C-alpha cells in the first residue's frame, strides 16, 4: 500500500475530526471560529468554502501511520492526530505575528486580515481546542490512564515548542549563535512536535514503552531534518510553492543553519547582513555568497544525516507492514519537498 493511498484514506477522516472540534458553539463567536477555519484552509476571507492548500498535514499523518505500524487501529488515534495538527497551527498563527509575515500558503495571514489582537486570541483559542481534541480519545475507547499519558506527552511537546520559538526570536538579535544552540532551538521548535506525533501514535496502539521510545527517536531525527530542509526553502524555495518571497529568512534576520554556516565562513556576508535594511539587491548578493561558501550544500548534508538516522531507528523498531514502508517513504519524501 503506497504512502499516497494511506494519506487518501486518512485525510478525509482527519479533516472531519478537526472540523468537529473547530465549530462555533454560538453565533456571537462565529467570526472567531471563522478566523481559525480560514487559517486551516477550509474557507476564504469571506468565510465561504474553498478548495486549495490546507497545509501539508505531515504531523497527523505521522501519528496515524505510527499507530498503524505499531499494530494499532488508526481511527482510534484520530483525536491525537487532530490535536497535533491544531497545536501546530496555533503556533503558526502566533509565529506569523512574531515574524511579521503577512502571507502563508499564498494567502494573507490571520493578523494581516483581522489585526494582531484578534490573531493572538485566535491562536490562544486553537491552543485550547487542540487539548479538547486530544481529550476526545476517551470517546474512542482509550483508557483514562492512556489519555493522561497522552496529555503529558502533548504538553511537554508544546512547552518545548515555545522554548524553541523563544530561542529563535532571541537569536535574531544575537551576532554569534553556535551550532549547538541552533540544534537545541530546532529540537524544540520543530522536532518536539513531530516526535510527539509519532510517540502518541505508538501510545494509542498500546505498545510497550521501549517501542514508544523508538518512535519518539524516529520523530526527533525526522523533525531535525524537516527543519533544516525548511531552512533551505526559506532562502532558496520557490515563492509559488512556499507562499513566501525569495530569501524570506534573510529578511527576517533568522539564524538558520545555512545562514550560520555562511556567517562563519564569509566575513563579507556578515557585513552585508548587518545593514539596517535589506533590499532585493542585497538579498540576491547574500544568496550568492551563501552558495559560494557551500552553505546550501552543508545544510543539505546535515538534513541527509538526520534522515539516515531516522531510517536506522525505523528499521530497528521492527514495525508492521504496510504502514512501516509508508513511514519509510514519507521520510525519504521530506528530502525532496519544495514547500
Image (tube, rainbow, N blue to C red):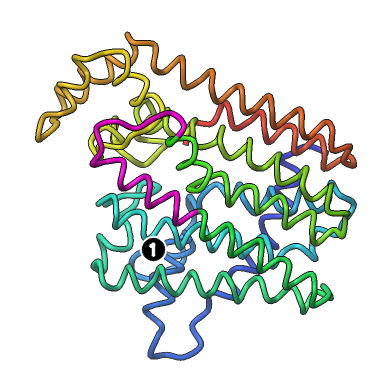
Question: Residue 293 in the image: x percent, y percent?
Answer: 34, 10
- Identify the residue shown where x is 71% and y is 66%: 150
Q: Give the residue pinned by disc 1.
A: 44
State the count of labels: 1
> Disc 1 on helix, strand or loop?
loop
The N terminus appears in which quarter of the rendering? top right
Percent from the top left, x then y, of residue 172? 27, 41
Rendered position, 117 above or below 337:
below
Spot the residue most to the top: 292
Please rate how many residues cluster around mark 1, counting C-alpha atoms within 10 Å: few if below 14, some from 14 to 19, many from 20: some
- Please check the rendered image and state whether residue 169 is part of the magenta-colored stretch, yes or no: yes
- Vertical relation: 250 (above or below) 104: above
Residue 83 placement: quadrant: bottom right
Residue 54 lies, in percent from the top left, at 50, 53
Direction from residue 274 to residue 234 in the image, left or right: right
Q: Which residues are magenta?
A: 161-180
At a point 78% along the width and 42% down the height, the residue shown is 214
Judged by its main secondary structure, the magenta piece is helix
- Residue at the location (34% across, 13% down)? 291
- 92 lies above or below 80: above
Amino acid at each position: 500500500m503506497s504512502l499516497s493511498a494511506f494519506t487518501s484514506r486518512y485525510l478525509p477522516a482527519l479533516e472531519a475530526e478537526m472540523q468537529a472540534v473547530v465549530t462555533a458553539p454560538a453565533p456571537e463567536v462565529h467570526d472567531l471560529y471563522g478566523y481559525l477555519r480560514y487559517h486551516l484552509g477550509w474557507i476564504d476571507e469571506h468565510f465561504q468554502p474553498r478548495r486549495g492548500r490546507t497545509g501539508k498535514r505531515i504531523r497527523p499523518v505521522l501519528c496515524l501511520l505510527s499507530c498503524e505500524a505499531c499494530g494499532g487501529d488508526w481511527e482510534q488515534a484520530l483525536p491525537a492526530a487532530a490535536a497535533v495538527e491544531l497545536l501546530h497551527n496555533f503556533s503558526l498563527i502566533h509565529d506569523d505575528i512574531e515574524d511579521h509575515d503577512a502571507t502563508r500558503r499564498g494567502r494573507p495571514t490571520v493578523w494581516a486580515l483581522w489585526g494582531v489582537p484578534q490573531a493572538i486570541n485566535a491562536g490562544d483559542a486553537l491552543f485550547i481546542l487542540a487539548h479538547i481534541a486530544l481529550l476526545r480519545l476517551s470517546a474512542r475507547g482509550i483508557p483514562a490512564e492512556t489519555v493522561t499519558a497522552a496529555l503529558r506527552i502533548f504538553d511537554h511537546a508544546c512547552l518545548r515548542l515555545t522554548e524553541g520559538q523563544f530561542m529563535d526570536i532571541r537569536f535574531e538579535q544575537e551576532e554569534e549563535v553556535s551550532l549547538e544552540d541552533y540544534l537545541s532551538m530546532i529540537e524544540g521548535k520543530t522536532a518536539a512536535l513531530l516526535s510527539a506525533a509519532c510517540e502518541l501514535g505508538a501510545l494509542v496502539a498500546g505498545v510497550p514503552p521501549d517501542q514508544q521510545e523508538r518512535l519518539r527517536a524516529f520523530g526527533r531525527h525526522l523533525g531535525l531534518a524537516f527543519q533544516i530542509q525548511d531552512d533551505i526553502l526559506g532562502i532558496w524555495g520557490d515563492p509559488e510553492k512556499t507562499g513566501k518571497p525569495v530569501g524570506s529568512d534573510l529578511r527576517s534576520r533568522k539564524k538558520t543553519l545555512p545562514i550560520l554556516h555562511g556567517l562563519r565562513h564569509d566575513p563579507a556576508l556578515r557585513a552585508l547582513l548587518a545593514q539596517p535594511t535589506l533590499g532585493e539587491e542585497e538579498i540576491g548578493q547574500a544568496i550568492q555568497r551563501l552558495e559560494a561558501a557551500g552553505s546550501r550544500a552543508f545544510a543539505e548534508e546535515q538534513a541527509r544525516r538526520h534522515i539516515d538516522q531516522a531510517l536506522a531507528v525505523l528499521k530497528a523498531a521492527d514495525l508492521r507492514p504496510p504502514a512501516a514502508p509508508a513511514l519509510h517513504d514519507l521520510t525519504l519524501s521530506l528530502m525532496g519537498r519544495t514547500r
